[in-house]
Image: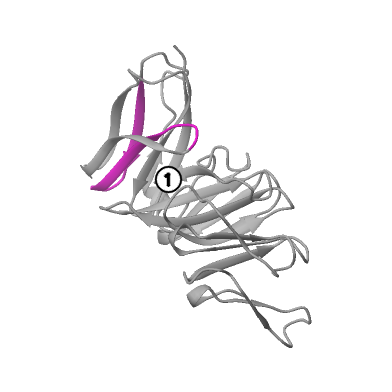
């Protein structure tokens, strides 16, 4: 159990008694995940990650590589884990997703800015994980988080908007991204690279009902896999495209 002011409590008798542990921090702690009696990870405010290999007798700080409120952590085994949370960019709240394949010795930023707040994550195995967040957002990966936008976010009202497959694909410089909405409203269309970092915003304005076609010019970008993501009123869909030079 974790909480405010760096509090960590441990039980070994099903909760009959709880013993305080020294976390070495005063930041608010938000989540804990144990894989067995000795290996545990705690996350919290301001990019706090703590790791124990002795059941919590001692905790070692790890680097998140980013200043964020890390709200949930989940491990599928000894080595593979994922953390989700959010940070303030100076103008908006942006989600953060981290993953590890070495038991938390190092953490890699897999996504920064895919959506707003993320509150929880569950890692089913080394490849499959699901995260939930603000506005009924649901994110899923089946690649261990290497590409964190593999799955779609879904919420009510998704029948009012449709994102089409880009054409041509693969493409060498330009491709057309089409979408259709049944009502006028604010729409956002973003481009992400293969690590889930937003690199471009194509649309962020009020869009009239009907089908829209947007030309994406990839001049200056390297060959590889990219993703385009459409958002409207809490609904989000993401698709993959391939740039070949």
Q: Quadrant of the C terminus?
A: top left
Please tell me whether the stretch drawn in magenta is mainly helix, strand or loop. Answer: strand
Which x, y percent locates residue 20?
64, 80
Q: How many marks?
A: 1
Determine the image quadrant of residue 14. bottom right
Secondary structure state at the residue bearing disc 1: strand
Left or right: 20 as drawn, with respect to 238: right
Q: Quadrant of the N terminus?
A: bottom right
Residue bounds of the magenta highlight: 175-195
Which x, y percent locates residue 59?
63, 64
Q: Residue at x 30, y 43 (%)?
A: 188
In magenta stretch: residue 19: no
Q: Residue at x 41, y 58 (%)?
A: 117
Which x, y percent locates residue 160?
36, 48
- Residue 13 in the image: above or below residue 48: below
Q: Nearer the viewer, residue 73 or 141?
A: 73
- Residue 31 in the image: above or below residue 189: below
- Residue 5 in the image: above or below residue 129: below
Left or right: 89 as drawn, with respect to 35: left
Residue linked to disc 1: 112
């Amino acid at each position: 159990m974790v909480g405010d002011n760096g509090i960590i409590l441990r039980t070994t008798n099903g909760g009959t008694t709880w013993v305080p542990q020294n976390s070495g921090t005063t930041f608010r702690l938000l989540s804990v995940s144990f894989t067995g009696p000795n290996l545990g990870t705690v996350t919290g405010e301001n990019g706090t990650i703590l790791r124990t290999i002795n059941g919590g007798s001692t905790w070692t700080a790890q680097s998140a590589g980013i200043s964020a409120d890390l709200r949930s952590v989940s491990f599928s085994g000894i080595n593979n884990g994922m953390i989700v949370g959010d940070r303030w960019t100076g103008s908006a709240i942006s989600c953060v997703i981290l993953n590890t394949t070495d038991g938390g010795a190092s953490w890699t930023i897999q996504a920064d800015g895919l959506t707003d707040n993320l509150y929880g994550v569950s890692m089913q195995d080394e490849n499959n994980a699901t995260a939930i967040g603000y506005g009924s957002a649901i994110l899923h990966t089946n690649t261990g988080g290497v590409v964190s936008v593999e799955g779609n976010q879904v919420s009510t009202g998704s029948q009012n908007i449709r994102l089409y497959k880009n054409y041509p694909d693969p493409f060498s410089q330009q491709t057309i991204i089409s979408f259709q909405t049944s009502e006028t409203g604010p729409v956002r269309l973003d481009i992400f690279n293969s690590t889930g970092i937003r690199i471009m915003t194509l649309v962020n304005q009020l869009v009239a009902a009907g089908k829209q076609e947007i030309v994406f010019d990839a001049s200056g970008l390297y060959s590889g896999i990219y993703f385009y993501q459409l958002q409207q009123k809490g609904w989000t869909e993401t698709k993959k495209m391939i740039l070949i030079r």
